[in-house]
Amino acid sequence: MRLSTGRHRRARTLSIAAAVAVASGAGGVYLGLSNGGAQAAAATVTVSSTAQLESAVKNAAAGTTIQVRGGTYTPSATLKSTANGTGSARITLRAYGGEKVRIDGSKLPAGSWLAGIYGDYWTVQDLTFVNSPAQGFVATSSVGGVFKNLVTADNGDSGFTLRGDGTTNNLVQNLDSYGNYDPAGHGQNADGIAVKFGSGTGNRITGARLYNNSDDGLDLWQFSSPVTIEHTWAFGNGKNRWSDSAFEGNGNGFKLGGGGASVAHAVNNNAAWDNTLHGFTENSNTGAIALNRNTAYANAETGFYFATGKARLARNLAVSNKKGLSKAGASTVNAANNWDAGVPTPAFRSKDAATAYGARKADGSLPATTFLTTGSTTIGSTMN
Ligand SMILES: [Ca+2]
Ligand SMILES: [Ca+2]
């Protein structure tokens, strides 16, 4: 009897010791244990080294939350996952607390993306992706993604990309994407945000700043379903900032089509300034693009260039664009824009863009600015 009891006690002690060893041996990775003592899928993983980050992304499954401690991470291969979350068990990749996390692609092989997500219901939040030799962050055929408070900067191709058929119901909120430049293409491809080569409804971009990229601020080339773009600023795109003697960057603020797609995107309350081509352009998209209360200021070509399609422009404001306020084809519908007859042009409170580059608010929303505001309740972007 006593022997039997003793064996039972020893077995229990061993079981607990084994669990502790698993947890501590994983170097700060916390593995959940089911009631039966068997290992279940990790629910919350906290990582503080590049190897841990690579492993955690690779092993993510529905319900996984990866918390990344502050610091710089330099992956040696693309952070890639094909795992799907669900609406009630998302996969989350985010900074731990308010810590600053910089994921740096400078150790990747040539041509590698920094991050590539191929699954559904991911939340990626509060992270910075820089110095990739190719794209910064790419979501392919993802459903229900939430990409919030991200920075994609100084990558070797577009900063942030949504692509592929079945790209549905994604939210991109408060993205800063700047300084992206593709040396191989002499700057002709690297956009701030690209929603290209795909389809799927319910995608929304809001609160972005897309600036100083070699190609366009935003590009919707060959995306054949409507995208909603609002409260986003595109500025300073298309300039040769890299001393590239064969520079080919385009530099539209908002390039709303191309490649044959005819689609009615919704473009509301955005601003484009100081781009090397147009502020806003259909780029051969013949669809009924709806543009309301946007502002185009001091772009090198036309403020609003919609020469061939059926765009519907209302209450937009264009000022000081070098090749004209707007170019409207016979099939466009224009109403109450400042280039329409009898519509006055309100004065800007400020033409100094400095505050637009400033720090975002604590929740990640756009910084407060008077730049390009007018106080009008009827025309132009509200710049917030
Ligand atoms: Ca281009
Ligand atoms: Ca482009």
Image (spheres, rainbow, N blue to C red):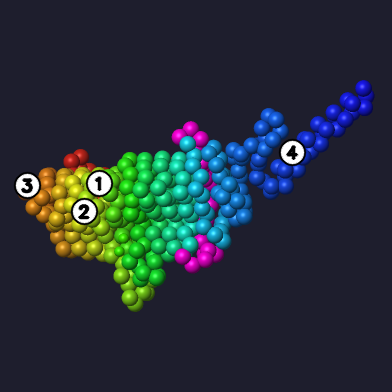
* Residue 332 as seen in the image, left or right of residue 143: left
> Mark 2 or 4 closer to N-term?
4
Residue 254 image point, x, y percent? 27, 55
Name the residue: 40% across, 57% down. 159
**Disc 2 to disc 3, how far (Cα)?**
29 Å
Q: Nearer the viewer, residue 134 or 177?
A: 134
Where does label 2 land, which residue? Answer: 285
Residue 350 image point, x, y percent? 26, 53
Quadrant occupied by the C terminus: top left
Q: Which residues are magenta?
A: 87-111
Where does label 3 land, which residue? Answer: 342
**Disc 2 to disc 4, how far (Cα)?**
59 Å
Residue 98 image point, x, y percent? 53, 45
Q: Element type at marker 1? A: loop
The amino acid sitting under disc 3 is Gly
* Residue 95 as seen in the image, left or right of residue 198: right
* Residue 323 as seen in the image, left or right of residue 129: left
**Disc 1 to disc 4, how far (Cα)?**
54 Å
Q: Is residue 369 visible?
A: no
Q: Is residue 105 above or below residue 231?
A: below
The amino acid sitting under disc 1 is His
> Mark 1 or 3 closer to N-term?
1
> Mark 1 or 4 closer to N-term?
4
Ligand 2 within 8 Å of the CB at mark 4: no
* Label 2 with label 1: CB-CB less than 8 Å: yes
